Amino acid sequence: HPVNVVATKPFDGQKPGTSGLRKRVKVFQQEHYTENFVQAIFDSIKPDGMTLVVGGDGRFFSPEAVQIILKIGSANGVKKFILGKDGILSTPAASNVIRKYKADGGILLTASHNPGGPNNDFGLKYNVSNGGPAPESVTDKIYEITKTISQYKVIEAPPVDLSKIGETTFGPSQVQIIDSVTDYVTLLQDIFDFPLIKSFLLDNASSFRVLFDGLHGVTGPYAHAILVETLGLPPSAVQNCVPSPDFGGGHPDPNLTYARSLVDVVEANNIQFGAASDGDGDRNMIYGKGAFVTPSDSVAIIADWAHVIPYFKKGGVKGLARSMPTSKAIDLVAQKKGLEYFEVPTGWKFFGNLMDAGRLSICGEESFGTGSDHIREKDGIWAIIAWLNILAAANKESPNELIGINELLQKHYAKYGRSFFSRYDYEEVPSDGANKIVALLDEAIKTSSLNGTAHVAKTAAGQEFTIASVESFSYTDPIDGSVSTNQGQVLNFADGSRVVFRLSGTGSAGATVRMYVERYVAPEAGAAELGRDTAEGLKGLIEVALGITKLKESLGREEPTVIT
Ligand code: VG1
Ligand code: CO
């Protein structure tokens, strides 16, 4: 099989962000653009003799990109490719396949929750042999190579038929095509108490109904295999579960704004347990009739109830962690249980080292990401089944009342207090406006000018917030000592409240400013105060944060694009 060397020139901006390289499809479709980035991955990892996993969420341009990866990978010496059928693997399934088949790494084709289709986003991400996203040292190297690349190598061969499970050869390489779903179902069956969940769902078929919304993303077949085929729920328990290359024209992000299809049906049909996942299957939202679970609470509750999940019953819980902007609810669980806990920068790649070192079992991000050390990516369906396992166990403990999402939440607040949490996203704003906010806070950090200042909220009577400190978050990885600086600016208030500002690293156009707001209320405040609406509970603090940073003026935006 002849190898062709193709001359090329570097493209600007091939810097992987929080989770891989994400750009408009049209950008990836430019001649040599995708090839350059793929060759840069291979130049950086030196794939000679390696086994690599390839798969993605099936979004528009995936079939073409898979063939490009195969041709360039083979020309660069990849010994074996393991692919999901039709190039499909959810992000958590890909992480599992890398680990289970002891591959050297994998290339994931996804832009996660970003919309797909010819006018929207595509993405590529490299994962290492532990199944997790490549660390910054690797992505920095890939980026450096993209700046000077002058050629890429391809083999001359007809495209591989991705629709047939089994082994074939492709040029000098082996190709193994596997079922996209089976290994993942086996994984979850070994983690959770499926018999307990199944009997709980069967016994409460009418009082506890379940609805999962795949948002036309990759999780549809996984959810069907688990919820319908394994747990015995009726087919009506899943919707929008046929994956489509443009996610049915929607925005496959499980939150209250974009997962309206779930929220509307849950509310209209009084469904006790609703859930959704994103385009590539690593995010989750838990939402029942009148009960929304903030992801920061979700991971804290899973940690608190870990003992009812067989995987943790057997292996124990080693430690807990959250990304910096995520609320401190999980910290309180760690303190009560005497567990080690960590605060890492945004992005799942920072959890991997801690897991590999045996110091972290359960972790999460406020951005609807929850997971554990069963793999090295966040895992949407894992989180949803974890909730079902916990609810089944809670109901077994208290057979005389039906414990649903809301009951579990209120019990948690009564025990630990509640961290009211919300995130405001200002998407695709002018960069100079975003930079103004960053500069204002940098100045405050340098001069301590805001420290000790008191700010009265007009919209929340009697609330006054005093700034204790302002800081820029840096992280030193306790395992390999690597340092990540400028990971967000934090306003710490005297009462323990926090407001964090960060620029998104996953957008494909313009700047996106994220403001994260957290206010803790202790259990002593009582049920009424703890059970308040989030927006109500945070109103005063939000007003103060917007005022201090002059955010509206700088961005020219009255309201955020999305509130979660
Ligand atoms: C966002 C989230 C972050 C998450 C990342 C990838 O990043 O805030 O918590 O890890 O998306 O999620 P950013 O840099 O835009 O804030 V996914 O589902 O795209 O893999
Ligand atoms: Co995702």
Image: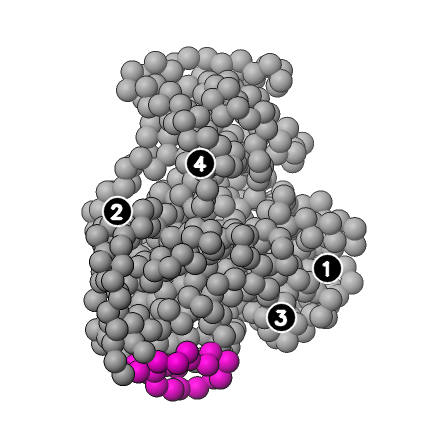
The nearer-to-camera label among 2 and 1 is 2
Q: What colour scheme has been applied to the protein in the rendered image? A: one colour
In this orientation, which residue lies closer to the viewer: 507 or 364? 507
Q: For the residue labelled by badge 2, is the local secondary structure a helix, a strand or a loop?
A: loop
N-terminal label among 2 and 1: 1
Residue type indicated by callout 4? Ala
Q: For the residue labelled by badge 1, is the local secondary structure a helix, a strand or a loop?
A: loop
The nearer-to-camera label among 3 and 1 is 3
Contact (Cβ within 8 Å) of mark 2 with mark 4: no
Q: For the residue labelled by badge 3, is the local secondary structure a helix, a strand or a loop?
A: helix
Label at residue 208: 1
Q: Dot 4, crowdedness within 10 Å: few (<14), some or many (≥20)?
A: many
N-terminal label among 3 and 1: 1
- On the image, numbered disc 3 is attached to which residue? 224
**Direction from residue 149 to residue 251 in the image, left or right:** right
Residue drawn at (73%, 60%) of the image: 209
Residue 514 horizontal/vertical position (percent): 47, 35
Label at residue 511: 4
Q: State how far apart marks 4 and 3 are (Cα).
A: 37 Å
Residue drawn at (55%, 57%) of the image: 117
Q: Quadrant of the N terminus?
A: bottom left
